[in-house]
Image (tube, rainbow, N blue to C red):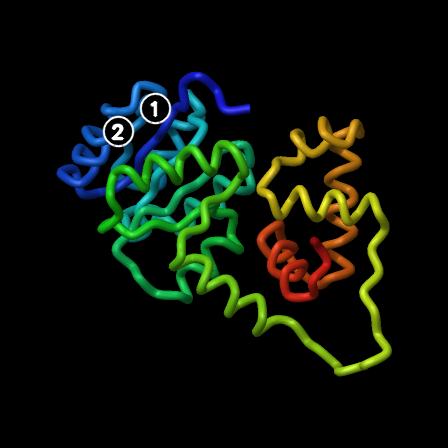
Amino acid sequence: MIPEIINIAIADDHKIFRKGVILSLKAYHNIRVILEAENGEELIKGIEIEQPDIVLMDLKMPVKDGIETTKYLNKHFPAVRILILTMFEDERFVGHLMDSGANGYLLKSTEPAEIKQAIMDVMKTGFYLNNFVNRVLIKKNYAKQKFNPNLNSEIVVSDREKEVLSLVCMEYTAHEIAQKMEISPRTVEAIKDRLMERFGVKNSVGLVFFAMKNSLID
């Protein structure tokens, strides 16, 4: 469930850009910036005092950069969602950051309306996938898969697994899936983990791509 007020932290060593993002977000009454930082170390110290829902973070920063900070936050503050906001339009950065715990990747040329949409999507589903990120993750996911052709092979999923898979593809959270299926969120996560291990993927995005590629959902 999305809270009435979404608390945001922003980390960027360029003060003018940082202030511009903050100003653009003031147009949305359900979004509040509670923390500013010039680098990852300053951000972490602030989060230890007041934890935001989402961090908007640049990659290239002094003292502690966005890559190091993403890994640290993912390990020590897993409830904090991370949206990368950077000028680096490099597919290698996208894949690495998403693997490291980022929930979305935006370029600094992004319009304020898309930043707002990314914030809402991350709060609702746990991730934000724009066309740029989708393209990178599809290529990355396909490159990882090892496939030995076997015309007699068949991917079998149970009715419960198929229902969970379908709801994941519809971008429902584990809590929402649990409510719809009248099971516990822990059971939902266990089913997702089992499917990810079976399909050889690492996250919900991988599940969606695998399900679509192999026509596992209607």
Q: Looking at the picture, does residue 47 appear above or below residue 58? A: above
**Identity, as a three-letter code, of the amino acid under mark 2:** Leu
Q: Which quarter of the figure has residue 40?
A: top left
Decide: few, some or many residues near mark 1? Use Cα within 10 Å; few <14, some 14-19, many ≥20: some
The residue where tag 2 is placed is: 25
Q: Which residue is drawn at 78% across and 45% down?
A: 191
Q: Looking at the picture, does residue 171 appear above or below residue 94? A: above
Residue 16: percent from the left, percent from the top?
Answer: 13, 38
Residue 166: percent from the left, percent from the top?
Answer: 69, 47
The quadrant of the rendering that contains the N terminus is top right
In this rendering, would 23 be left or right of 188? Answer: left
Q: Residue at x 85, y 51 (%)?
A: 158
- In space, the residues marked 2 and 1 are separated at their CA atoms by 7 Å
Q: Which residue is drawn at 52% across and 65% down?
A: 138
In this rendering, would 124 be left or right of 58? Answer: right
**Residue 31 badge:** 1
View extreme (left): residue: 16
Q: What element carries label 1?
A: strand
Q: Residue at x 32, y 39 (%)?
A: 115
Q: Earlier in the sequence, mark 2 or mark 1?
A: 2
Q: Which quarter of the figure has residue 168?
A: top right
**Identity, as a three-letter code, of the amino acid under mark 1:** Ile
Q: What element carries label 2?
A: helix
Residue 192: percent from the left, percent from the top?
Answer: 73, 47
Decide: few, some or many residues near mark 2? Use Cα within 10 Å; few <14, some 14-19, many ≥20: some
Residue 179: percent from the left, percent from the top?
Answer: 72, 26
Foreground: 81 or 69? Answer: 81
**Residue 73 badge:** none
Whether tag 2 and tag 1 are in contact, CB under 8 A, the answer is: yes
